[in-house]
Image (cartoon, rainbow, N blue to C red):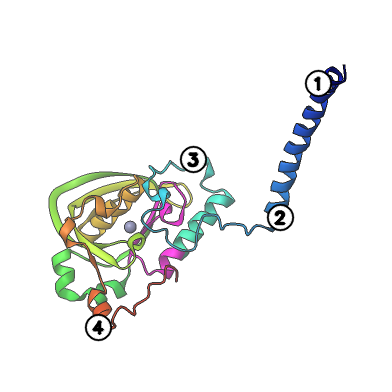
Amino acid sequence: MFQHTNILNKRPVILVLTRCRSSFAKFREWYRDLWAPQLPAPPFKHVCQIGDPTLRLKAGDVPLEEISSDRMKHILLVLRSVMKNYKSVGISAPQIGIPLRIMMIEIPEYVVKHFGPEVCKTREIVTTPFRVFINPVMEITDFKQTVFPEACESLKGMSALVPRYRGVHIKGHEYDGSPTEWDATGWAARIIQHEMDHLNGRIYTDIMECKSLQVDLWKTINAKQGNVYIKYNK
Ligand SMILES: [Zn+2]
C-alpha cells in the first residue's frame, strides 16, 4: 500500500522536477550569456584567413532592393575601409565574413610605382580607378593564359604562381544599384578573376602551381633566426 501510493505520487513530482530543470537550464544559459564575452560579428575590420568556412561558401546575390539599405551601406563602407587599410588592389565581401557577391578593385599609382616599369610592362599593370561590383557576372574575353605571382590577404605573407586568362568582361551593379560593366585586360583582369573566385568559394591555392607556393619573408625569417611576427589586422 505504501509503495503503491509512492509510485502514484512520484509521477507529478518527476514532471515538476523536469520542468524545473528545463527552466533552470534556460535561466543558467541566460545568466551565462550575460557574462560571456560577446564574439565580434561580421563585417569584420580584419581579413579572414584560409580555413575560415566563409571563404569556402558560394556567396549569395545581394537582393537589389537591399542595395540602399543601412545594412548594405555599412557592409560596403567596412569593405572599402578594410581594402584601404590593407592597401589591397582587390577585395571581396567573404573576406570580411560576409558571404555576399560584392567585390572591389583599384590599382593606385603607388602600386604601379612599387612594381616599376619593367614588371608593369610584363604583367600589364596600369593605374585603375576604384570600382565596386555588386552581383558581378564575368565572361572570359581573351583565353590566352599568363602565369604570374599572386598573393591574397586571406593567405597573409604568402604568394604563388597562378595562371589566369588575359582578358575578361565584367558586369554588375554600383553602390546605388545602377548597372556597370568593364572590359579588363592584364593585371586588372587577373584581380577580377581572383575576386570572382572568392565569391565562388575558391582561393588561388586551388589553381596555383603548387611547388611555387612560398612564404614571402622566408629569407628574413632565416636572417632573424625565426624572430618574425605576422599581424593579422592593420
Ligand atoms: Zn584574395
Q: At 16% from the left edge and 59% from the top edge, which residue is drawn? A: 211
Question: Which of the two labelled residues, at mark 2 and mark 3, occupies the earlier sequence position?
Answer: 2
Asked whether the beta carbons under mark 2 and mark 3 sit within 8 Å of each other, the answer is no
- The answer to if 28 sits in the magenta stretch is no
202 over 114 or under it: above or below: above
Q: Quadrant of residue 158?
A: bottom left
Mark 1 secondary-structure assignment? helix
Residue 57: x and y, percent?
Answer: 39, 44
Q: At 25% from the left edge and 83% from the top edge, which residue is drawn? A: 223
Q: Nearer the viewer, residue 185 or 145?
A: 145
- Tell me how far mark 3 sits from mark 4, CA to CA: 51 Å
- Tell me how far mark 1 sits from mark 3, CA to CA: 60 Å
Disc 2 versus disc 1: nearer the observer: 1
Image quadrant where one finds the N terminus? top right
Q: Which residue is mark 3?
A: 63
Q: Amino acid at mark 1?
A: Ile
Question: Which of the two labelled residues, at mark 2 and mark 1, occupies the earlier sequence position?
Answer: 1
Q: Which residue is mark 1?
A: 7
